[in-house]
Amino acid sequence: MSQSAPLVLRYWLLRVTAATRAGKIIKDVMSSGELGVVQKVPSDWIVTESDLEVLSSNCPPEYVETKPEDIVVWVDPLDGTSEYTQGLLDHVTVLIGIAVNGRADTMGSHRFRSWRFSASRTPADKFIVTTTRSHSDGIVVKALEALKPDEIVRVGGAGHKVLLLLEGRAHAYVFASKGCKKWDTCAPEAILEALGGKLTDIHGNNYGYGKDVQYPDAQGIFATAKGVDHALLVSKIPQELLDAFPY
């Protein structure tokens, strides 16, 4: 790989390469029917002409001088583990999030995202919220009730839930719980915000992803699709529920 390319460009390329290879391994293991050794493909790491095109592209000015200590990479190699064991592969994602100076890297996700689509419109005739499939409790339920959705889609995997927002299949992803970690939300936040959506805690504040932050997303997850009034929905969460997630 060209060492003359700006550091951030090299990280962006490695993220796509690693995610692609990880996805292949996940599929191979599922196809084999056993959690054994899978075939390794060294050629996955060869720098191709398309890779060189990425490395030679213009780096955004604010990233040109980025140093290694400015970058933190948050990885969930298999998001949606429970669903994976049940054969629900559409719930499974490989999440590789790059944070630069403590913020999820939306610029890299916008320029070099592996999903080649634009955010789709959400339904205008009903309000749909997606949430956890297997980790609900009283607080999670009360937060959902406060939003008065017409439909609740319960699925696994933080990455999968954000994909539902991007695909226009849900307006919001709400999880009033401390169950998620930074590796669950860094990559989804970057891609969602690059495509016009928003991901915050349930207070409406962004998470930090620097090297010194705590791993849990201790103030829950509140994400909205493009075109949805994020602040308005956050304002519907009762204060008693917000008080359950102090800073």
Image (spheres, rainbow, N blue to C red):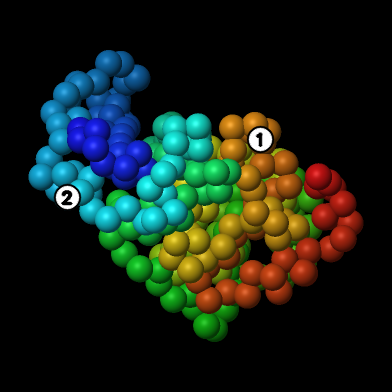
Name the element at disc 2: helix
User: Disc 1 vs disc 2: which is toward the camera?
Assistant: 2
Can you name the residue that lies furthest to the front here? 65
User: Where residue 142 appears, x then y in whole percent?
Assistant: 78, 58
Which mark is first along the chain, 2 or 1? 2
Disc count in the image? 2
Q: Quadrant of residue 171?
A: bottom right
Vertical comparison of 171 with 207: above or below: below
The circle drawn on residue 93 is: none
Vertical comparison of 129 with 86: above or below: below
Name the element at disc 1: loop
Foreground of the two, 93 or 134: 93
Which quadrant is the C terminus positioned in?
A: top right
Residue at image position (44%, 36%) is: 67
User: Where residue 166 appears, x then y in whole percent?
Assistant: 44, 63
Q: Amino acid at mark 1?
A: Val
Q: Amino acid at mark 2?
A: Glu
Q: Which residue is mark 2?
A: 53
Foreground of the two, 133 or 40: 40
Q: Is residue 220 left or right of residue 228?
A: right
Q: CA distance from mark 1 to mark 2?
A: 34 Å
Can you name the residue that lies furthest to the left here? 49
Foreground of the two, 145 or 103: 103
The answer to whether residue 31 is seen in the rendering is: no
Can you name the residue that lies furthest to the bottom here? 125
User: Where residue 69 appears, x then y in whole percent?
Assistant: 50, 32
Q: Is residue 194 left or right of residue 209?
A: left
The circle drawn on residue 213 is: 1
